[in-house]
Image: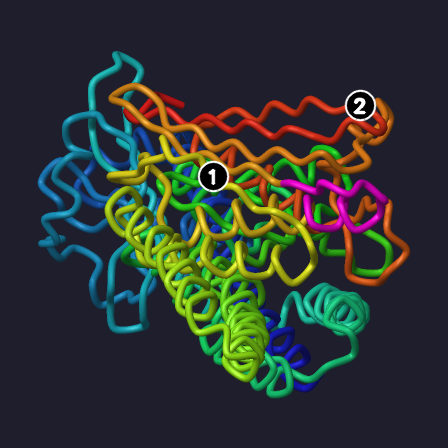
Amino acid sequence: MLLSVGIVLFSLVIGLLIIVGGMIRVTENQLGQRLMTIARTVAQIPLVQESIQEPDGWRQINPTAHKLRVVNDVTYIVVLNMERVRYSDPLDERIGTVFEDAAVEEAYSEHSYLQKVKGDMGTALRAYVPIMDEQHQQVGVVLVGRVMPGTWEVMKSERGNIALTLILSLLVGVWGSYLLARHIKKQMLDLEPEQIARILVERTATFHAMHEGVIAIDNREHITIFNDRAKQIFGIEGDVLGKSIRSVLPDTRLPEVLELRQNFTNTELHVGNALLWSNRFLIKVEDKIVGALAIFQDRTEVARMAEELTGVKEFVGALRVQNHEHMNKLHTIAGLLQLNQYDKALAYLFEINEEQEELTSFLTTRIMDENLSGLLIGKVSRGKELGIRVVIDRMSHLEKFPPYMDHHNFVLILGNLIENAFDSLEQCERPDKEITISIEQDEEVCSILVEDNGIGMDEETREKMLERGFSTKSRANRGLGLHLVHQLVRKGRGELVCHSRPGAGASFMITFPMKEVDD
């Protein structure tokens, strides 16, 4: 508030100087017009025109000029003949002397003009007018001068108007300043400037310390926040604040939040070459939309965490299943030995060893990724524990992953599809429960097939199965597996086809192109 009042007072001082300056200019213009009128009047007096041509004409001219000077309140009226000899002057001792000021030169060329000069009494304004006789011949010059009033004199003469103007300006300025300050403070949530500065510094530091990328825009789609993590994710360098989001990152879909006026949560976006999870929200202040905010998380980190929750857990479960299975086999061998069935015990031992070695050898030579091989071995063992036969097509082979995909993605896709098949088979009473897995690729496509003979799905379930949160199970934290598979298929520019009928099992076929395609 004090700052506002100070600014108002400073403005009044500047305004006062401008007002006084304007008054001085007006006074000077008015004085100039008056001096020019007086000079022309003197030059047109017949007595002056006749006497100026006589040697003792000053006797008639000087008294007349003196009277006019007093009546018109001017400092001096000087009449000169063509030899520049004074015929009138405020000082009688100058009568008959030569006027030597060069400023009068133009007046002897029949020119009338005003001129500002400095003299002993201060700055004066002079009017120069030639004296013409009846034959229109120049016979002399009249110059009328008056010392100009000083600044203080002008202010003193106009003190009433100046005081009224200043008082009204001060009242209006202070009142307007008060209203403006109150409005600005209300707009700033009643915070003081130092509080706003501290909050801004803390907010900026917080955003830059976040592990997620944070981008915010205002209603004009100009960037207001772009933290360091967002720059790392999108490969942006330099300061982008204030720039249009479309010119910096055209495919963030952040302006979509403003256009549709709704939030978007837990969605996957393709931005450049990055695959991201994003949450996008409207920014509101007092129920008024002022911008939009997006929080991005690199999909790689999410994939790693998802693999931790699916693949790693499955490996642990597989180890537990294998331990349980080996214990049963050891008990069988021990029983045969106690019954003195040595040949059967040896044959059983060779059988289970060949079976395990055959599966391990097949996966090692045909599937060129240890993570995927380990997952498949684990699922086979899990199936045995559940009484489900897991069959891996011996024509399967995988030499390299398709573009845009890696072993994290394949582990998540296969792990979720096989787990869904397990869930389906656990709900049916079929004696020959079976899951068939096939992975094939050539130069054009890579395909994944997971089939089961479980309970199957009706048409309504097939239509909703890819929606986030949809599940036919009543347990918590369900409905994410197929949604995640669908997102990964989109990332790899692939296609997912499902065939299923109630009671006839389900078949999931996923194909990925082996060559990069244009978006």
What stretch of residues is rendered in magenta? Answer: 421-434
Label 2 sits on residue: 501
Q: Earlier in the sequence, mark 2 or mark 1?
A: 1
Name the residue located 50 percent from the left edge and 61 percent from the top edge.
378
Whether residue 384 sits left or right of residue 353 in the image: it is: right
Whether residue 35 sits left or right of residue 55 in the image: it is: right
Quick one: which residue is furthest to the front in this view? 340
Tell me the quarter of the image containing the N terminus.
Answer: bottom right
Q: In this view, does 179 lie above or below 209?
A: above
Label 1 sits on residue: 270
Name the residue located 66 percent from the left edge and 43 percent from the top edge.
483
433 magenta-colored: yes
Q: Nearer the viewer, mark 2 or mark 1?
A: 2
**Tag 1 secondary structure:** strand
Identify the amino acid type marked 2: Arg
On the question of residue 450 being in view, the answer is: yes
Whether residue 363 sits left or right of residue 316 in the image: it is: left
Q: How crowded is mark 2: few (under 14 residues within 10 Å), some or many (20 or more)?
A: some
Kindly indicate the quadrant of the structure image that contains residue 160.
bottom right
**Tag 2 secondary structure:** loop
Kindly indicate the quadrant of the structure image that contains residue 130.
top left
User: At which x and y percent is residue 198?
Assistant: 57, 86
Tell me the quarter of the image containing the C terminus.
Answer: top left
In the image, 223 versus 263, the foreground residue is 263
Name the residue located 21 percent from the left edge and 43 percent from the top edge.
80
Name the residue located 42 percent from the left edge and 57 percent from the top edge.
300
